[in-house]
Amino acid sequence: MKIKSHVPKGNKTDSWSNAEADFDNGNDSLVIFGNPVMESWEKPYMKKLADTACLKGGKVLEVGFGLGIASSFIQQNAITEHHIIEANQDVFKKLQDFSKLSKVKVFGYQGLWQEVINKFEENSFDGILYDTYPINEKELHIHQFNFIKTAYKLLKPNGVLTYCNFTSWGNLRKEYKDDYEMFEKTQSDKLTEIGFSKIKLHQVQVNPPESCNYYQFKTILAPEIIK
Ligand SMILES: C[S@@+](CC[C@H](N)C(=O)[O-])C[C@H]1O[C@@H](n2cnc3c(N)ncnc32)[C@H](O)[C@@H]1O
């Protein structure tokens, strides 16, 4: 499917669930509404996010299944439960197939995280990985912070959160000298306001192809954020 824009145009919140998900070249990229939602070159970064979310073992929550790359890496860790929230129905079907073959038990939830999050108890997760997509144009740079407020409550004390917002960071990064400055100036304060004080940043090498229109840098940070 042809990429129309690297940022969402208009508010897709209501229609995202039923939109057709295009898995190009088998499972190499995921395009929804002409937006590049996920591309497989992100793999090394997804491994770092997955391993970070599993640092404490136990019960792990993942938000956004996409191509299932991070999910596969999560499954390679010593955890006891793997909970995954996915909004898009076509992507959710892939999640269901994935869960049939999974080593660690998968609990899948179909819907926007905003719709299903009340199912979960406070202080119940050891690790959380958030990687969704800004389906509301106005929230391009900030959607993660709404979730992170909730994540703070869902995590057990000493639990670990990791997240990314590639679509936002690919834009923001152009304004700062490096990844660290970008993170410090655009993310750190908000995490501290929410209540997180222990933040460690891991720099990961990536190699986006020229065809990628949302990220053109060779590194990206995977945050390890402890409650
Ligand atoms: C960038 S992809 C995730 C990529 C994934 N980490 C991987 O390794 O393949 C984002 C996914 O989040 C889903 N999504 C977007 N907004 C969501 C929301 N509010 N709640 C749940 N899922 C959402 C999209 O449908 C898409 O499947």
Image (cartoon, grey):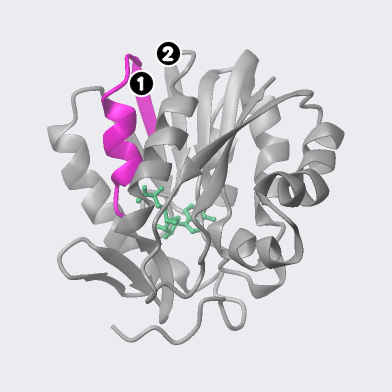
Q: Which residues are magenta?
A: 67-83
Does residue 5 appear left or right of residue 179 in this picture? left
Say above or below: 122 vs 145. above
Figure quadrant of the N terminus:
bottom left
Q: Residue 31, located in which quarter of the rendered image? A: bottom left
| SS at mark 1 in the image | strand
Q: Quadrant of ligand 1?
A: bottom left
Where is residue 148? Give x, y as percent. Answer: 68, 39
Does residue 111 appear left or right of residue 141 in this picture? left
Depth check: give the residue in front, 135 or 69: 69
Q: Amino acid at mark 1?
A: Glu
Residue highlighted by disc 1 = 81
Depth check: give the residue in front, 180 or 4: 180
Residue 12's label in the rendered image is none
Q: Amino acid at mark 2?
A: Gly
Please say whether residue 79 is one of the residues in the magenta stretch: yes
Where is residue 60? Give x, y as percent. Answer: 44, 25
Task: Identify the residue at image location x=49%, y=13%.
Answer: 56
- Mark 1: few/some/many CA within 10 Å (<14, 14-19, 20+): some
Cβ atoms at labels 1 and 2 below 8 Å apart = yes
